[in-house]
Structures are given as C-alpha cells and as structure tokens.
Image (cartoon, rainbow, N blue to C red):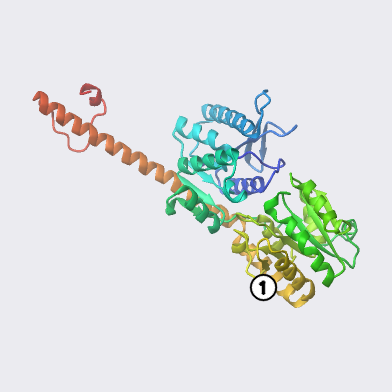
Amino acid sequence: MKILMLTWEYPPNIVGGIARVVQGLSTNLVKKGHEVHVITYQEGNLKAEEIDEGVYIHRVKNYMINPTNFTEWIMQLNFSMAERAISLINKTGKFDLVHAHDWLVQYAAKTIKHGFDIPITATVHALESGRQRGIHTELQRYINDVEWLLSYEAQEIICNSYFMKQEIQSLFGVPYEKVNVIANGINVDKFDGVERDWKFRRNYAADNEKILFFAGRLVPEKGIQVLFEAFNKIKQNYNDVKIVIAGNGGYMNELRQKTYDLGIAPHVYFTNRLNDEQIIKMYKAADVAVFPSTYEPFGIVALEGMLSGNPTVVSDAGGLNEIIRHGIDGMKSYSGNANSLADSILEVLFNKELVKQITACAVKRVKEEYSWDLITNKTEKIYEKTIGDRKVVEASTEELIKEEIKETVKRRSKKSKMAIPERKNEVDFGELNAYA
C-alpha cells in the first residue's frame, strides 16, 4: 500500500506521545513492504525533505503570517500540509489511504479525502473532553467539534484502549464496529544490553537512596501533583527517597511551587526533556517508575517502565488500568488519591520478592503483547478494511446511480411513449444526459 501519514509532531520534534507512535508504525510498515510518506511540521532547522529508515518525511512550515492564537496556527499548518500532499499526489500518484493522527490534522485530511477520493483511517490519541474533564470554554468546544468531524470523515477509527473506544462512542455516537482498539507499540529491544550507569545516577541521588522516576509532559492530567502530595507519607516510612521528573510543559512553574509549599523541594529534581539516550539511562538509574495520571488514554511510558525492569506504579485512569495488572506485572493506585499512591510505592520499596516477580512478568508481557511487529500487523488489517469499505461504498453508490438511471429512463419513456431498448445487466451512463 501507499500510505500518507499526517501528524503535527514527528521525531526529533517530540511534543507528546504521537511522534514516537507514528515513527514506530511508519518504520515497521516500510519493513513490511509498504510505501510510507509522513507530512509533519518543520521545527527549527530540521530538513524539509528526508528519508529515514525508508520513510519519506516531508516537513512543512506555516505561512509567514503571525497567528493570533493556537487554532489559527493549526489551521495554517493544515493549509501547508494539504498543499504538500497535493504536490506529492501530482508528482507520484494517489495514495491508497490517509492516516490522520488526532484533530490537529483534520482539515488537511478532509481536503485530501474529498479532493482526491482517498479514504481516511484516523487515530484518536486523546480527547479534549477527557483532558479537561468536560467542555468548559469556547476553545475546548471548538476542539471537541473538530474531533467529532474527524471521527465522522474517517472510514475507520483506531484508538489505543477500550477506555478510549467507550469515550469516542459516547461522545460522538460513532458505530461500535467503526472504532478499532489497537494498543501503542514499543521497541522491545530498547533496553537490551543497557546497565545502570552509577556515575550518571549520582547526579540525582546517593547510592543508598531510591529514585522515583516520572517521564512525560508536565500538564495537570499527568498527576505529578498527586505524587508530590504522596511524598511526605512515603518519606515518613522510607527516608532515603528522591523524585526525578523528566519532561517539560505549561504546568512546570506550578509544580515547582508545589514542592516548596509541601516542603519537599530538596528531594525533587526537574531535568526538563531528556533525549533518547538520557531517558534510557534514567530508567536504568531509577528504582520505581511512577505514572499517576488523572486522565490517560493509553500511557506508553508505562510500557517503558515495565520494559526497563523497574517496578511500575500507575493510577487506574483510562488506558493505564488496562496495561497494568495489580500485583502481577505492576502496581495500581486510585486515580487522584495520594494516600493510595503512597501505599503502592511503599509496597515495592519494601517488598523485594514482589518486585522480582512483577518485573519479570512485566518484561515478558511487554515483549509478547506490545511489539511493533504485532501492532503493525493489526494496523495493516484496519488499512485493508478502510480501503475495502471504501470500495463497497463506491460500488453501492454506483449501483444506486444505475438504478436511478433505469427508473428515470422508464419514467421518461413511458411519458413520451418512446421505445427504449431493454438492457439486462448495465446502463450506459451517457444516457443520463439524454433523458435529463
């Protein structure tokens, strides 16, 4: 298949989890013999055109017009994406399908669909209503409406958890069979051969101290504030503990202030965003991976924590609840409940036998159930379904047109008493003009 991916972020430009998901899927589709083109935003001095692991990457700039807000910026990006797609199609021919990732690329996907009759597969990575716990402002309502439009225009929808499937259906009234659950994948060899770098670790903690590690965007729904609220209870029971927070985002200042308000600032390190090599080192330096989200469609970081060999503690929010099995391959806590989170963290800090069991089970499960080979195979089937559904729609539409023509011919011939030759299997579409 010839596939066009639309995404606003793609490595090395990483804003959230979409970038790594699109990269993992695209590179594995190429390995399976498909031709994959990615159109994305050109951040900084990144190359406008590049081939990376067989994937054709096309990066576009926004117009030289300063937008007044984020939605205008996104609209300009979509114009640029659509222009680049049109140019590609004119040069290299049509794509078999467009794979649109989230509402941020909806307008470009819709333009390509209707301009060139190319079906859409859409992956919904998250929903505004879930992030904001409802729709409260005009901007949130706008994003929610664009998400609905993407779900309407898509031939097939992919989401990464059954939690998300239920959310999409209840919000947008999408038919059950149109929403397909495919988990995000991970490079299962990511931590192979990597040992703990003690010199690196000593930047954050003494050798006798335990590190609680979080990686992700610094936004309220990631629940970092809950971890901070749990820390005093943890420290009262296990004194030698530090927290390392890797990532950045708009919630940074509030989180820093909260560490001072709670009196835990000396025990918390903010590293900002780490590169791939540093993230791998940090997972290996940590003793517990903690992801206490209050809203989480999936939670690929939980897979990283499990694969790294760390005991992984999560909340029971959204997709995290489906990834971790409490006491089997990780530990869960009640979402937003600092006391519950502290109890789960303390359990793995004290119970070495439990840690040994759940970490071994976690690594095995991630390698068996979340490899990119498995995820790509499942996605291929949705692509085939997307193209097949489109052909069925086209065939049904053609049959309807033929029947309408037959009826038109019969009515006109009866009225004018014209002798119309009988046709057995097909109707000449040219006759439509003759009887119009």
Examine the rendering and report whether any part of residue 193 can be seen: no
Picture mark count: 1
Task: Work out whether residue 32 or residue 200 is closer to the camera in this orientation and state it.
Answer: 200
Residue furthest out toward the left: 417
Residue lying at 78% horizontally and 59% vertically, measured from the top left: 228
Figure check: 348 above or below 394: below
Residue 82: percent from left, percent from top = 56, 30
* Quarter occupied by residue 75: top right
- SS assignment at label 1: loop
Residue 13: percent from left, percent from top = 71, 40
Label 1 belongs to which residue? 327
Residue 201: percent from left, percent from top = 87, 59
* Quarter occupied by residue 233: bottom right
Figure check: 207 above or below 1: below
Task: Work out whether residue 270 or residue 108 is closer to the camera in this orientation and state it.
Answer: 270
Residue lying at 72% horizontally and 51% vertically, measured from the top left: 216
Residue lying at 15% horizontally and 31% vertically, measured from the top left: 410
Question: Mark 1 is on which residue type?
Answer: Gly
Image quadrant occupied by the C terminus: top left
Examine the rendering and report whether any part of residue 422 can be seen: yes
Task: Work out whether residue 239 or residue 298 is closer to the camera in this orientation and state it.
Answer: 239
Q: Is residue 79 left or right of residue 305?
A: left
Figure check: 13 above or below 385: above
Residue furthest out toward the bottom: 353
Task: Work out whether residue 302 or residue 173 is closer to the camera in this orientation and state it.
Answer: 173
Residue 273: percent from left, percent from top = 78, 47
Local packing at callout 1 (Cα closer than 10 Å; few below 14, some 14-19, many 20+) is some
